[in-house]
Image (cartoon, rainbow, N blue to C red):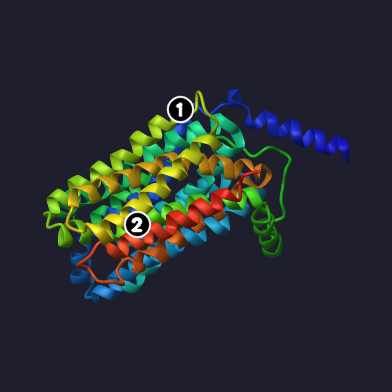
Amino acid sequence: MASDTSDRTSRLDGASAPGSGIGLAMLLSLALLSAIAPLATDMYLPGLPRVADDLQASPSSVQLTLTAFMLGLAAGQLLVGPLSDGLGRRRPLIVGTVLLAVAGLGCALAPSIIVLIACRFLQGVTGGIGVVVARAVIADRTSGDRSAKLFSVMMIITSAAPVVAPLLGGALVGPIGWRGVFFVLAGLAAVMLMAVVAFVPETLPAPMPHPIEPRAIGCGIGAVLGNRRYLGYTLTFGIGFGAMFAYISASPFVIQEVMGFSPGMYSVLFAVNAVGIGIAGWTNNRLLRRFRPHALLAAGVAVLSAVGVAMLVVALAVPGVHWLLLVLMFCLTSSFGFTAGNATALALGEVRERAGTGSAVLGSLQFTVGAIVSPLVGIGGEASATPMAIVVFGCTVLAAGSFATTIR
């Protein structure tokens, strides 16, 4: 038994050494896999009115295409993460990207809203495969500071996707229509497939199979959730994302309805804040040369908490000082650039033997929290920034409490 443990530890150390290799081509391939979800979420949004007209569907039915995608994204991660711990990383990625392309074609050719909703759900499930396995591959090959640096680099790359997607979609809907947007997404899936085949080898340490029966999958999820430090880092990431998603959900109304900015100016401000995430991720990557991921995460959580308190004070005490709230929005999104990469690296570092399962739980929590906070910011109506500030404050307090549980 001791020999087996030693052998397993040796395999893990070898797989996680920086020298074992995540080159630039492989990293870009993994980033593309992670970016497909926000691209598929946002690119077709400018064409929603046309979808309703072409398929003779109600606006609420068309909105279900987005809901179905998000549900599929969460379900796909929970399903494929544990499977990748038993089957390996490469096979699920190849099968998933093939099905992602098929789902994109199905959306493009959908004859009715029911078919479109079903294909969007499949697109979410298969898009979730790339997100969860990309994180697991990095956890397989790296650890510690190296892992945090790569997650920060991926954060820089993928943070551009939510900004580019609606702009690209708006440019494409006119000349090629909403169906053409889905053909483009299917083409991107084909590019992803070629990248996976060419640049992403099998990275799961072998032989380390985990049973893939439903009961064993449940046990695997229970095992990672039973790791106190993993759970603390995961909650820090997921609830911290909730604070940012509260901003994302409320900002169109706050910036345009409350502050009076035009839709064009809103797009500019949204892009600036998204760029802030990338700058923070790049800065975090540089700071990892001198500081450990846990210390940088502590600093990021401290900034996040301070922003949450300040945003609530500004919204309640000086609601007319719009420039100050805009600055706090930028600080909020930028702080996520410090928390996301470090929290992800530290969480998956706690469950290295079940990195796929750990990545799946982390990703599912992220989108579940996002789904919860999105309607909360609208409870108080569209004429005030206070609901957004309250939700952001609550999320930052909970994120700080979650981080506190990771301290030895």
Q: Amino acid at mark 2?
A: Leu
Q: Secondary structure at mark 1?
A: helix
The residue depicted at 29 percent of the width and 49 percent of the height is 329
- Residue 151: x, y in percent? 48, 37
Position of 69 relative to 330 (above/below): below
310 or 59, nearer to the observer? 310
Q: Secondary structure at mark 2?
A: helix
Question: Can the viewer see residue 168 in this picture?
Answer: no
Which quadrant of the figure has residue 158? top left
162 or 408, nearer to the observer? 408
Which quadrant of the figure has residue 88? top right
353 or 171, nearer to the observer? 353
Residue holding disc 2: 105
Which label belongs to residue 287?
1
Position of 116 relative to 201 (above/below): below
Q: Are the residues tagged 1 and 2 within 8 Å (C-beta)?
A: no
The residue depicted at 32 percent of the width and 57 percent of the height is 312
The residue depicted at 57 percent of the width and 59 percent of the height is 79
Find the distance from the CA under tag 1 to the CA under tag 2. Answer: 43 Å
